[in-house]
Image (cartoon, helix red, strand yellow):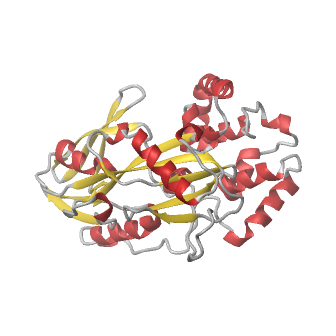
Amino acid sequence: MKEGFAKGFEYSDCWVDDARLVALNAIDARDKGADIHCRTRCVDAKVKEGIWNLTCESTNDGDRQIIKGKVLVNASGPWVSKFLNEEMESSSHHSIRMVKGSHIVVPKLFDHDRCYIFQNDDKRIVFAIPYEKDFTLIGTTDEDFQGDPADVKISQDEVEYLCRLSNSYFKTSISSNQVVHTYSGVRPLYDDGASQAQEATRDYVLKVDELDGAPALNIFGGKITTYRRLAEHAIEKLSGFFPEIGGAWTQGATLPGGDFPCEQATEQVSKLQKEYPFITKSHAERLIRSYGTRYSLLLGNATSLEDLGQNFGADLYEAEVRYLMIHEWAQKADDVLWRRSKLGLRIKGADKEALSEWMAQNIKKLAKAS
């Protein structure tokens, strides 16, 4: 940091890879009996004789199917109000305030594993976080957003804002041309009438409605840090309709591959390298961080790097891509590089094209194995 900053405070927080969290929750749900329909859009939701009938359409080929259920949970995030009003045709007046948050990724600005929290003169808090070993993640912004959340993206003003704030604190100056990646998201905050985007409540709000005798739970807001509490609260809300639904059980429950104490991650890396001595330490660390004890499903009976197949760069081999296509619903390069990992920061150009071509050639064969 620049000289002149003499005081600060320290606190502890948790870190998670959002892409892995989403995928592992879906795997966990599937293992517990849920049917997972990726790339499927619900285009109509109606109650018939007390049962929800959902018309679902594949975004791959347009095929439609009817899914029936006793209860509908509308957890569609920034689309929650749209789905409520259009697909469900509900007269409910609940609504959300969409707030855009954007981030930039730059070459790393410091050589330790701590993050910084900076306050701007507009009273906003911005983080600078170590990211994927070689980068620093800076964000986020807060702007009211109108339009389709699928089209959200960072503005040049936001890029300049984050660069300017970073330059106010760090000795290493950055500019927009040093930004290697950006991403934006829309927070679906419950509309509580707050005057400014950063003042809107971050708490989730659950609303249960009955349409023609069938319950529907609509979820407004929510965030990663409280996602399990939100899920348990949702079950509590529905227990009045379904007493047999059971109570909370997630405290202490691990996601697939996470069945070891967090302080033993280093031991898991060593165990992997002992079983597969041809795997480098950095490669083993990434595999443990991403897949935990499931690494053996990925590496199988391999006794050399050659057994893992084609290398697409950044230690991404055919074996890992095959695992992601069979076990984690990946179909395209961006599914692997961004939606199941952050390897898109490193694998680009010709390597990405090679990955896309390999996946296209193998998708039908691997679909039968999934």
Q: Is residue 126 above or below residue 19?
A: below
199, 69: nearer the viewer: 199
Q: Residue at x 78, y 32 (%)?
A: 309
Judge from the rendering whether residue 348 lies leftward or rightward of residue 37; answer left or right. Answer: right
Judge from the rendering whether residue 18 lies leftward or rightward of residue 350; answer left or right. Answer: left
User: The C terminus lies in which quarter of the figure?
Assistant: top right
122, 182: nearer the viewer: 122
**Image location of residue 146, percent across then percent down:** 26, 43
323, 241: nearer the viewer: 323
Judge from the rendering whether residue 50 lies leftward or rightward of residue 146; answer left or right. Answer: left
User: The N terminus lies in which quarter of the figure?
Assistant: bottom right
**Image location of residue 102, percent across then percent down:** 44, 48
Q: Is residue 245 visible?
A: yes
Query: Farthest front residue?
Result: 4
**Image location of residue 122, percent across then percent down:** 37, 61
Q: Is residue 257 above or below residue 54?
A: below
Q: Residue at x 43, y 68 (%)?
A: 226
